[in-house]
Structures are given as structure tokens and as C-alpha cells.
Amino acid sequence: MKYSGNQEYSPKRYDIVAQLLHWSMALILVYLIFFSHFEDLADEVMISSIKLHSGLGLLIIFLAALRWYWRKTHGVASAWQGVYPIQ
Ligand code: HEM
């Protein structure tokens, strides 16, 4: 469905791009948080680990901007769709 910035448009569920953005960011974030202590590593491993950490850190900023744009242009799935009134 074409969407042109209408905030009221709410798809049934997130599309594949939104899902990929969500889960790739989640995985990268978990990696960045858990593999962020470089002090006990051998010098060469430390340098490549810091490079990887920094690269992924910059990538996640780019992905966050993309994700913001995607939400703006493709809508946000309603949290209430598919939920019975009694719930
Ligand atoms: C969302 C993105 C990021 C997350 C969640 C993240 C997370 C972390 C965490 C939890 C630490 C350990 C801090 C500590 O307890 O000492 C750390 C350290 C570090 N991060 Fe990141 N980081 C991110 C992005 C970046 C970026 C973009 C860069 C560089 C361009 C970077 C460079 C470093 C460096 C050099 C350290 C080591 C600092 C030290 O131990 O002296 N990080 N990061």
C-alpha cells in the first residue's frame, strides 16, 4: 500500500525491512555491550576488536537513522490489532 506520511496509517504488522532493521540492531547492540572490554586482550586482538566495535557502533547510528526514516514512511504497526477486547 502507498503511504505518504499519514500518521494515522497503521499496518497490521511490521514489514520485512522494519523487522530486519530491528533484529540486526538488536544483535549488534548486544555484541557491542558484551564485547566492549578490551583491556585483557593481546595487542593485535585488542586493536582489531576495537576496530570492529567502532565500526559496528558507527553502523548502528546509520541503521537507527534508516529505521527512523522507515517508520516515518511506512507507518507503525498498531499494538492493539489482533488483541481481543477482553485482554
Ligand atoms: C550504540 C553504540 C555503542 C555501544 C552500545 C557501545 C558500548 C560500549 C561499552 C559498554 C563499552 C565499555 C565501557 C567501559 O565500561 O569501559 C565501550 C567501550 C568502548 N567503545 Fe563503545 N559502544 C558503542 C559505540 C562506539 C563507537 C561508535 C566507538 C568509536 C567510534 C566506540 C569506541 C569504544 C572504545 C574505544 C571503547 C573502550 C573505552 C575504554 O575502555 O577505554 N564505541 N563501548
Image: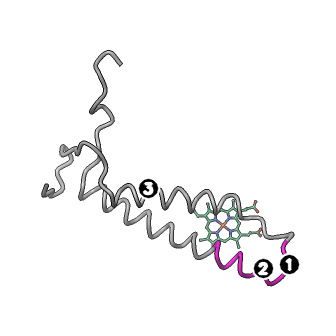
Classify 10 Å Cα crowding around label 1: few (below 14), some (14-19), many (20 and above).
Answer: few
Classify 10 Å Cα crowding around label 2: few (below 14), some (14-19), many (20 and above).
Answer: few
In the image: residue 64, left or right of residue 17: right
Q: Quadrant of residue 84?
A: top left
Span shown in magenta: 41-53
**Residue with the mark numbered 2:** 45
Query: Quarter containing ligand 1?
Result: bottom right
In the image: residue 78, left or right of residue 43: left
Q: Quadrant of residue 44?
A: bottom right
Q: Position of residue 54 (x, y in %)?
A: 62, 74
Above or below, 49 relative to 81: below
**Residue with the mark numbered 1:** 42
Mark 3 or mark 2, which is nearer the start of the sequence?
A: 3
Label 2 with label 3: CB-CB less than 8 Å = no
Label 1 with label 2: CB-CB less than 8 Å = yes
Report the amino acid beneath label 1. Ala
- What is the spatial separation of the Cα atoms under label 2 and label 3, in whole angstroms? 29 Å
Q: Quadrant of the C terminus?
A: top left
Q: Position of residue 16 (x, y in %)?
A: 33, 57
